[in-house]
Image (tube, helix red, strand yellow):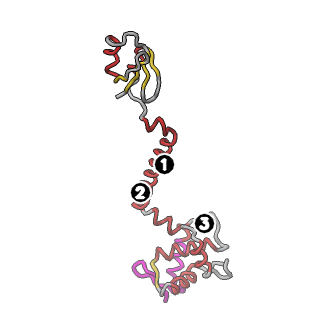
Amino acid sequence: MVTFICETCHSTLAKKQIEKHCSGRCREAWHFTCIECTKTFAGYDYKEHNECMTEVQRYQGKFLERQREQKLKAKEDQKNKQNEKQNGKAEDKDENSDDTSNKKSLRRFLKDSKTFQGWAKSAKLLIEDRKGKMKEKRLQKKLLKLYKLSEQWEEDHKDEDLIKKMKEEFQGKKSGLKIEDGIIKAN
């Protein structure tokens, strides 16, 4: 409810009391000031003033607005993170991130620290480093990262094509790899 001050007699009035005030006690009243926004209304203009800013909005203005925007943004970010987790995208981001420690550990599998040794040979080295077996998907991701660290990698190479080449090489008898139930073992 909006509250006004009569500029003639300085009485505090609720909006519904103004007409009664003008017809009875203060017949000369013509200007009314809103207590909350300190805007003065002439004549019957006060009737259009239905809602007003609160004291908090009045004194904290832009600060309050920024606070609300930050809360909304935080809620949106939280919803986005939840959606990503549900879709499995957050997991993919972690695995595809270029962590410097991960790069360092993978570089030791590159010959002369720049040359990629081939899918089967690199896979064998990775598997031997991991107690002789490794999940196929994990191995594929590690090999892709390793390949991207090498000199042979070019921006136009697609991951899908590289995975096809990788699988073809794994299937070969000379690869020395054995695939069982999504787990690759070195022979």
Q: In percent of the image, x 40 and y 10: which residue is there?
A: 28
Q: In percent of the image, x 42 and y 27: which residue is there?
A: 35
In the rendered structure, which disc, 1 or 2, sits on the residue that comes first in sequence? 1
Instruction: Look at the picture and state if 27 lies above or below 82.
Output: above
Q: Mark 3 points at which residue?
A: 157
- What range of the chain is rendered magenta? 163-187
Q: What residue type is labelled 3?
A: His
Q: What element carries label 1?
A: helix
CA separation in Å, label 1 and label 3: 41 Å
Quick one: 98 or 145, which is closer to the camera? 98
In the image, taking residue 155 as reference, residue 159 lies left or right, namely left
Q: In percent of the image, x 40 and y 13: which residue is there?
A: 29
Disc 1 crowd rating (10 Å Cα; few below 14, some 14-19, many 20+) is: few
In the rendered structure, which disc, 1 or 3, sits on the residue that comes first in sequence? 1
Q: Mark 2 points at which residue?
A: 83
Q: Name the residue under label 1.
A: 70
CA separation in Å, label 3 and label 2: 29 Å
